[in-house]
Image: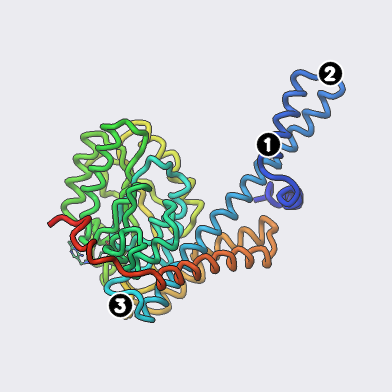
Amino acid sequence: MPIFRSYQKASRMSIKTYSFQEVGMCSGLLLQNHTEGGYTVRAGCAFWARRILRWTALITSLMQVLDIYRKLILARLFEEKAAELYLQGHIYGFCHLYIGQEAVAVGLSENMIPQDSVITGYRDHVHILMRGVSPENVMAELCGRATGCSKGKGGSMHMYSKEKLVYGGNGIVGAQVPIGAGLAFAHKYRADGGVAFVFFGDGAANQGQVYETFNMASLWNLPVVFVLENNHYGLGTSVDRAAAGGTLTNRGDPFSIQTICIDGMDVFDVRDKSVAAIEQTRNGGGPVILHMDTYRYRGHSMSDPATYRARAEVETVKKTRDPIMRVKNLLINDLGVSESEVAAIEQEVATIVNSAAEFAVASPPPHESELETGVVL
Ligand SMILES: Cc1ncc(C[n+]2csc(CCOP(=O)(O)OP(=O)(O)O)c2C)c(N)n1
Ligand SMILES: [Mg+2]
């Protein structure tokens, strides 16, 4: 990252002095002068325009990295708070945490547009947060409160938002995949520019309905991005014991669906390796599979002590591949952001998460009159 190193001082100075728009406008003006202005001014302007454009790019990059870090921290702290509320008895039933896998949902959210729809399994808290549903509404849903995004009737596994086009939160393994193809069909039919992001796990990848869906999605050239979150375990069974063929990265081959292999613990790999494929799908190129090599730190759900794997395995992943640690190191070691600036972001997000928990716990349960609304009887 030499370009970052050499300009880190300039970018850090600039970020404190100018807003992104100010610097962008300034460089635009200088470029205009360069084309229209007199001889002497021209040379100087071109020099400064180039410099400012470079600074603008750097500031944009730095701001993007800071924003991504904030999102990763939100995902991690939100899930840690959910675990705390579960143990305190505020959350009932199942609660599947996303700790360790944050880079997948965060990185892909960078490439989504508001018209896109999202559907996933039961490990869904972070997916809906990344679509912009507030931490208050998601935490309230976890606690089964009327202020939750599914009015307190879905809980941990069934997060929905009509406004943000999030279609759950589905408890039946793999069931979201054909529904996701239906969402993609709707995008195509309405020509609304959206694509359907369909998340599913390595366990779900052995389900028959997934392959019926691949077949149809490919035949009908649907705008669907299949995101295979391979966290290496389906409940307590490792992918090596559950999936024939030694890999999940060729599962789209019989249907002529391209698979892109991505390090799902590296948010920039997720963002950058998926961007072209998503655009291709958006522009009529048909479905694509993004294979995310990721890992969950906790058990399958809050009630799973995860005794089927060695503690050392988890510790090694935490030490060598943690998605948050990677971005923190980039910020501090390569982009010149100080440890206290990073800590301030963490504190700011912790405050948001704490007040979301307070909001959720203080919210009322759903009213009796809601008993038969929003459900198919
Ligand atoms: C059709 C169906 N079969 C079995 C189950 C029980 N079950 C719940 S979660 C799970 C494992 C799924 O693993 P994976 O798809 O890898 O997702 P992850 O939990 O790792 O995110 C199973 C078998 C279920 N919910 N639905
Ligand atoms: Mg899994």
- In the displayed orientation, state which residue is furthest to the left: 377
- In the displayed orientation, state which residue is furthest to the right: 40
Q: Residue at x 71, y 42 (%)?
A: 55
Q: Looking at the rendering, which quadrant does residue 366 occupy?
A: bottom left
Q: Secondary structure at mark 3?
A: loop
Mark 3 residue type = Asp
Q: Which mark is residue 340?
A: none
Q: Looking at the rendering, which quadrant does residue 236 occupy?
A: bottom left
Q: Residues within 10 Å of mark 3 (few under 14, many from 20)?
A: few
Disc 2: residue Cβ within 8 A of ligand 1's nearest atom = no
Q: Is residue 92 above or below residue 22?
A: below
- Marks 1 and 2, how far apart at CA: 22 Å
Q: Is residue 253 above or below residue 204?
A: above
**Residue 269 location, x and y as percent?**
48, 51
N-terminal of the pair, mark 3 or mark 1, is: 1
Mark 1 = which residue?
A: 24
Q: Residues within 10 Å of mark 1 (few under 14, many from 20)?
A: some
Q: Name the quarter where the C terminus is drawn.
A: bottom left
**Residue 11 location, x and y as percent?**
72, 49
Task: Name the mark nearer the viewer: 3 or 1.
Answer: 1
**Residue 104 location, x and y as percent?**
42, 56
Q: Secondary structure at mark 2?
A: loop
Q: Residue at x 46, y 55 (%)?
A: 106
Q: State left or right for residue 29 relative to residue 204.
A: right
Mark 1 residue type = Gly
- Marks 3 and 1, how far apart at CA: 51 Å
Tell me, what colour scheme is on the image?
rainbow
Front-most of residues 172 and 291: 172
Mark 2 = which residue?
A: 38
Mark 3 = which residue?
A: 304
